[in-house]
């Protein structure tokens, strides 16, 4: 069993709400990229290289937020290895995670506001 599979088998990881997403990232991205390396061989340069090569299955580029998410998962995986004294330093923590600037700022139209108002649950009066 490689490091990624060991990580996914941990009960503390299986209990995470994001387990399905983590499993997807680990099996489809992290294991294929880092799979041939021992934990102690992974460097900050490798982490940067994994970020740089990240593509969708169809070869198209992915959004920065997706790359950052994979990085966060790798960082968590290596933090657990540090806690278990398998690593002395987490190389993923040495690589900065840039801000994705995914903010969405827009104002609802009058029709959208009306639809939202109609779909919202009615406010019940408080009990006194």
Image (tube, rainbow, N blue to C red):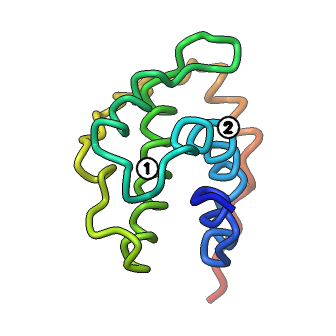
Q: Are marks 2 and 1 in contact (CB under 8 Å)?
A: no
The residue nearer to you, when weighing 44 against 20, is 44
Residue at far bottom of view: 128
In the image, taking residue 83 as reference, residue 37 lies left or right, namely right
Q: Is residue 103 above or below residue 124?
A: above
**In which image quadrant can residue 119 be found?**
top right
Q: Position of residue 78 (x, y in %)?
A: 42, 61
Q: Give the foreground label among 2 and 1.
A: 2
- Left or right? Give the position of 56 relative to 121: left
Which residue, given by chain and number where applicable, does mark 2 sit on? 28
How packed is label 1: few (under 14 Cα within 10 Å), some, or many (20 or more)? some
In percent of the image, x 44 and y 32: which residue is there? 50
Apparent side of residue 116 relative to residue 62 in the rendered image (left or right): right
The local crowd at label 2, few if under 14, some if 14 to 19, many if 20 or more residues have their Cα within 10 Å, is few
Quadrant housing the N terminus: bottom right
Alpha carbon distance from label 2 to label 1 = 15 Å
Q: Which residue is labeled 1 in the image?
A: 72
Q: Position of residue 94 (x, y in %)?
A: 23, 49
- Quadrant of the image occupied by residue 18: bottom right
Quarter of the image with the C terminus in it: bottom right
Residue 12 located left or right of residue 105: right
Rendered residue at 44%/58% (across/down): 39
Which percent across, then down, holds residue 20? 72, 53
- Residue drawn at (37%, 51%) of the image: 41
Element on which disc 2 rests: helix
Q: Residue at x 61, y 44 (%)?
A: 31
Q: Secondary structure at mark 1?
A: helix
Q: Nearer the viewer, residue 69 or 128?
A: 69
């Amino acid at each position: 069993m490689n490091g990624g599979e060991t990580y996914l088998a941990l009960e503390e990881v299986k209990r995470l709400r994001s387990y399905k997403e983590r499993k997807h990232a680990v099996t489809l991205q992290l294991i294929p990229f880092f799979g041939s390396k021992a934990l102690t061989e992974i460097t900050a340069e490798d982490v940067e290289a994994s970020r740089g090569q990240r593509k969708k299955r169809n070869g198209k580029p992915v959004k920065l937020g997706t790359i950052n998410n994979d990085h966060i998962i790798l960082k968590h995986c290596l933090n657990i290895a540090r806690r278990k004294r398998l690593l002395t330093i987490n190389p993923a923590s040495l690589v900065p995670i840039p801000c994705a600037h995914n903010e969405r700022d827009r104002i609802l139209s009058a029709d959208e506001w009306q639809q939202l108002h109609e779909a919202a649950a009615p406010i019940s009066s408080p009990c006194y």
